[in-house]
Amino acid sequence: MPNMPGTTRRQTVFLRSFLKNPAGPSPADWPSAPILRRWLRRPAFLRALNTIRQTLHFQSDLLLAFAASSSSNNASATPTNPSTIAKKPNSPAARTPSNSSRPAKPSPPSTPHDSHPTHFIPAEPLNAPPADP
């Protein structure tokens, strides 16, 4: 494949590596920091990199919209009456304390700090006489 206009062969290989792997180039394929800074000063490389960024951003927005649409379609297709929902044996709705496979969480131990807070300072002394109106 020919080089992208305005970029070197190494820059073109780097930019095209985004097409091969959705997560981007592997760490070994990235240029060193000084080389990347030099590349970013070139308008053609910066334009190509911004185009890739915008494309990936659009793709993620599109996938998120599809997921939201699918989720709303699935939510509207489910029955609203709880008695008509089929309960699976291991679903959280079917689990009760008597048939749960894991023990119940123990309550945290009470500490003296919880029962008698010493950090509370009242606005008025507790033994002060009531104020006259």
Image (cartoon, grey):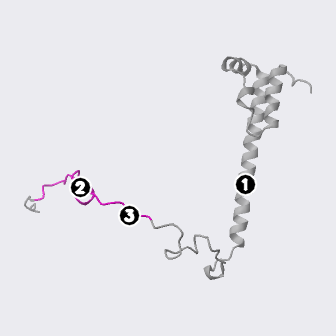
Query: Measured from the top left, where is residue 104 in percent x and y?
Result: 45, 67
How crowded is the residue under tag 3: few (<14 C-alpha within 10 Å), some, or many (20+)? few
Give whichever of 121, 133 is nearer the camera.
121
How crowded is the residue under tag 2: few (<14 C-alpha within 10 Å), some, or many (20+)? few
Residue contact between numbered discs 1 and 2, judged by CB atoms under 8 Å? no
- Within the image, what quadrant is residue 46 found in? top right
Dot label at residue 117: 2
Type of the residue with mark 3: Ser
Magenta stretch: helix, strand or loop mostly: loop
Give whichever of 109, 62 is nearer the camera.
109
- Above or below, 73 against 31 in this view is below
- Above or below, 108 against 91 in this view is above
Q: Label 3's element?
A: loop
Q: Point out the stretch of residues depicted in magenta.
A: 105-126
Query: Measured from the top left, where is residue 97 in percent x and y?
Result: 49, 74
Residue for point 72% across, 22% down: 31
- Above or below, 26 against 109 in this view is above
Q: Which residue is mark 1?
A: 65
Asked whether 84 falls inside the magenta stretch, the response is no
Residue for point 74% across, 20% down: 39
- Residue 7 visible, this orientation: no
Between label 1 and label 2, give the one nearer the viewer.
2
Between label 3 and label 2, give the one nearer the viewer.
3
Query: Measured from the top left, where is residue 12 in percent x and y?
Result: 83, 25
Q: Quadrant of the N terminus?
A: top right
Between discs 3 and 2, the one toward the N terminus: 3
- Above or below, 117 against 88 in this view is above
Asked whether 108 falls inside the magenta stretch, the response is yes
CA–CA distance in space, label 3 to label 2: 20 Å
Q: Which residue is mark 3?
A: 107
Outermost residue to the bottom: 83
Type of the residue with mark 2: Pro
